Amino acid sequence: MDNKELNKARAVYYGVFSRFFVYSKDTTEYFQLRDTLKTLSKNPLDKTSKEALDSILEKLDSTSNVTLLSEFDDIFYNPTSSTIRTSASFYDEGVESGKKRVEMQQFLGKTKIRRNEEKFTEYEDHFGFVFTVMSELSTLISNGEENYQTL
């Protein structure tokens, strides 16, 4: 596989990872996620990937995103249990909006990628945003913007 094709594949996988960390009530995005997972399952990287993708698809409701949103809330926002933090700053310093956020903002300053604050309210060091940036960078590289390879 050449680098262009590899970066296209990376973009797809990073996009999938992003959607599992970004809260969205938009059912269109949910069904796009399911479609992408189906495509990846039909074209897996290996046997283990196929098994994992099929397992995820089995758990996702084919008619509604309610189950996924409920699980998302339980894992990341349930006040009655230990929630899982989703920012690099928290895991680096134990605080939200710390050094890793600043580092990510500085990194983004070197790119044409920006956070749309109306659509994405989390900070720049949020895992969902980082995966989205990685997907976008992989797409840019696969489209011939070689300067992003060494960034």
Image (spheres, rainbow, N blue to C red):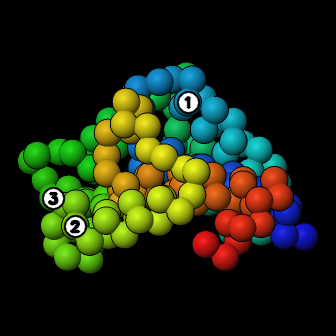
Instruction: Classify mark 2: residues with Cα within 10 Å, few (<14), some (14-19) or many (20+).
Output: some
Residue sticking out furthest to the front? 110
Give percent across and percent down for residue 73. 27, 41
Closer to the N terminus: mark 3 or mark 2?
3
In the picture, the disc for residue 82 is: 3
Question: Can I make out residue 104 in this image?
Answer: yes
Position of the N terminus, as image quadrant, is bottom right
Which residue is found at the position 20% from the left and 76% from the top? 93
Q: Amino acid at mark 2?
A: Gly
Where does label 2 land, which residue?
Answer: 98
**Observer-nearest residue: 60 or 112?**
112
Q: Amino acid at mark 1?
A: Glu
Find the distance from the CA under tag 3 to the CA under tag 2: 21 Å
User: From the viewer's perspective, is 126 left or right of 19?
Assistant: left
Give percent across and percent down for residue 38. 72, 42
**Observer-nearest residue: 151 or 36?**
151
Closer to the N terminus: mark 3 or mark 1?
1
Instruction: Classify mark 3: residues with Cα within 10 Å, few (<14), some (14-19) or many (20+).
Output: few
**Observer-nearest residue: 108 or 29?**
108
- Front label number (3 vs 2): 2
Closer to the N terminus: mark 1 or mark 2?
1
Q: Amino acid at mark 3?
A: Ser
Find the distance from the CA under tag 1 to the CA under tag 2: 30 Å
Where does label 1 land, which residue?
Answer: 29
Which residue is found at the position 90% from the left and 70% from the top? 2
Give percent across and percent down for residue 57. 60, 44
- Front label number (3 vs 1): 1
Look at the numbered disc 1 and give the secondary structure of its residue.
helix
